């Protein structure tokens, strides 16, 4: 029996679920395997060499799982490792998330903007090239050190205290917020509480999903059947798996539907 193909999605934790949900919205007939790398979380404070090495290990695992495409749902990993992976694994389709700064340029260029991202993303060559190309000269870059890890643990009180301390100074100064880490869309409500109700959020998940669909279609790799979602965590943490299914809003092992 021929082994079913899958789309691999990986992140340093469960933050990449914000990407997976957008993909499922437009590709509901695919099989997915989501790899949460909590053993090495967070990526943002690690050296480029360590990030590339870990991303290659995950890539090799996902290739063995018969993945036809691999989605890097972590901005730090994407900025650091995707060029290396594409060069080494030429036959694999890699789709990589990136901070949605170009969307600000396209839709709200004149408005003051805050980019929230990990230190690794903000320091990366890939992001800096993007920033220099689309800089509206009204942008604050803020490295939210440790925030992804707090979100990963789901501690609402710590999240609130962190946001007030780290980004409270931008209240009244910005209209746009670029969510440069896939964990951050999980706390949009809390960010809005700190910065104000008129904030417009930008993240790259929806565009990534459309790009993935276009690339699979061009290669005649789209499926037309009921799909499944698998979850793996590098530490086998039950609490991570429980939170993953809660956020995805489907039952483990069940056929999924388009998420409304």
Image (tube, helix red, strand yellow):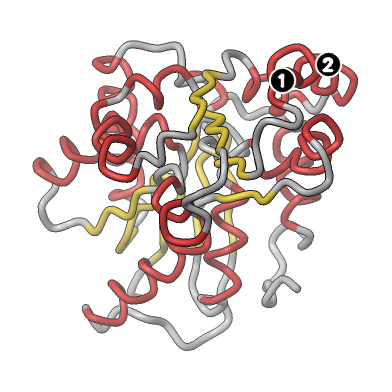
* Residue where numbered disc 1 is placed: 150
Mark 1 residue crowding within 10 angstroms, few (<14) / some (14–19) / many (20+): some
Instruction: Using the image, determine if residue 179 lies above or below residue 158.
Output: below
Residue 183 picture quarter: top right
Camera-side residue of 193 and 106: 106
Q: Determine contact: label 1, label 2, CB under 8 Å.
A: yes
Residue 158's disc number: 2
Instruction: Give percent across and percent down for residue 215.
Output: 28, 72
- The quadrant holding residue 103 is bottom left
Image-quadrant location for residue 182: top right
Above or below for 51 versus 204: above
How crowded pointer 2 is (Cα within 10 Å; few <14, some 14-19, many 20+) is rated as: few
Q: Where is residue 144 in the image (x, y as percent from the top left)?
A: 58, 19
Q: Give the mark, 1 or 2, whose residue is nearer the N terminus.
A: 1
180, 109: nearer the viewer: 109
Exactly how many numbered labels are in the figure? 2
Question: In this rendering, would 171 be left or right of 213?
Answer: right
In the image, residue 164 sits, relative to residue 110, either above or below, namely: above
The residues tagged by marks 1 and 2 sit, at their Cα atoms, a distance apart of: 7 Å
Residue 29 horizontal/vertical position (percent):
53, 79
């Amino acid at each position: 029996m021929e082994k079913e193909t899958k789309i691999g999605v990986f992140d340093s934790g469960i933050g990449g679920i914000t990407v997976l949900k957008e993909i499922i919205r437009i590709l509901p007939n695919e099989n997915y395997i989501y790899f949460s790398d909590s053993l090495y979380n967070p990526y943002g404070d690690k050296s480029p060499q360590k990030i590339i090495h870990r991303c290659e290990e995950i890539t090799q695992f996902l290739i063995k799982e018969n993945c036809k495409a691999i989605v890097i749902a972590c901005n730090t990993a994407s900025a650091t490792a995707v060029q290396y992976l594409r060069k080494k694994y030429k036959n694999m389709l890699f789709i990589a998330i990136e901070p949605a700064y170009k969307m600000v340029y396209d839709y709200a260029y004149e408005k003051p903007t805050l980019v929230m991202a990990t230190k690794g993303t903000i320091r990366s060559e890939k992001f800096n090239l993007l920033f220099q190309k689309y800089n509206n000269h009204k942008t604050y870059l803020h490295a939210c050190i440790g925030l992804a890890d707090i979100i990963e643990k789901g501690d609402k009180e710590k999240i609130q205290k962190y946001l007030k301390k780290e980004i409270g100074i931008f209240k009244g100064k910005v209209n746009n917020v670029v969510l440069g880490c896939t964990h951050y869309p999980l706390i949009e409500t809390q960010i809005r509480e700190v910065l104000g109700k008129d904030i417009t959020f930008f993240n790259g998940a929806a565009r990534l999903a459309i790009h993935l669909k276009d690339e699979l279609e061009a290669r005649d790799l789209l499926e037309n059947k009921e799909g499944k979602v698998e979850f793996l965590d590098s530490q086998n943490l039950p609490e991570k798996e429980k939170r993953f299914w809660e956020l995805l809003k489907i039952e483990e092992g069940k056929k999924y539907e388009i998420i409304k």
